[in-house]
Amino acid sequence: MLGLQFDTETSWVDVAKNGLQQLLTDHAFAEQKAASNAVSIIINYSEETALVKDMSDIAIEEMEHFRMVHNLMVDRGMVLGQATKNDYALKLQGFFPKTPDRTEALIHRLLVAALIEARSCERFKVFADNMEDEQLSEFYKDLMISEANHYTLFLGYARKYMDREIVDQKWNDLLAFEAEMMKNRGTSAKVHG
């Protein structure tokens, strides 16, 4: 369903479990960054009423997810660590060349956001399916559904604002780039690590 061209190895789950506090900190800040991205889209494309409405919903939902992850950490006696740069997102954002065309720039942002959500969904499923901790397994199964919904929303908007064939070519190129990138990942306790 997600169209990803590289599957996360289950060995990543052991890395994530062994660095659970780091994973949860990374996850919490990833949710915060997703909310910030939605707010930024609202600011930059405020004339797109339907998009603004949906991005408002996503921003609120992502901040709720941040709170949920933080509460989970507190319940387990953990303290939220410092945010680190998300090199995964930065590399994806650098894939498309900068463009002065506002519509094309929006398409690129939406495609990158869709891919981040798709990979998060896939990672959450792998984590939930290979987790003995029932609370964490259920927690990540619930979040997985939300990530899938965000993925389809972002991709749907990208296809709304530009010819579908052009968007799908851009999407396939981004998927191929991300698959190559993911072959060298899976060794750090981060959602996209």
Image (cartoon, grey):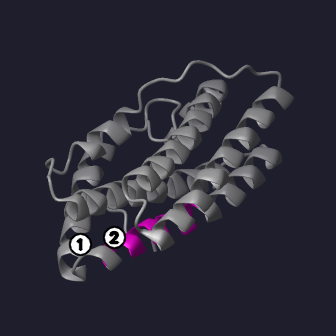
CA distance for labels 1 and 2:
7 Å
In the image as oriented, which residue stretches furthest toward the front? 47
Q: Is residue 111 left or right of residue 125?
A: left
Q: Is residue 71 magenta?
A: no
Hey, which residue is sitting farthest right in the picture?
75
Label 1: few (<14), some (14–19) or many (≥20) C-alpha neighbours in 10 Å? many
Residue in the image at 57% along x and 39% along y: 32
Q: Which span is picked out in magenta?
A: 147-159
Q: Position of residue 21 (x, y in %)?
A: 66, 25
The reply to whether residue 175 is visible in this rendering is no
Relative to residue 81, is residue 193 depicted above or below? below
The relative height of residue 23 versus residue 118 in the rendered view (above or below) is: above
Point out which mark residue 167 bears: 1
- The image position of residue 103, as x and y in percent, is 24, 64
| Residue behind mark 2 | 158
State left or right for residue 129 relative to residue 33.
right
Residue 155 colored in magenta in the image = yes
Q: Quadrant of the C terminus?
A: top left
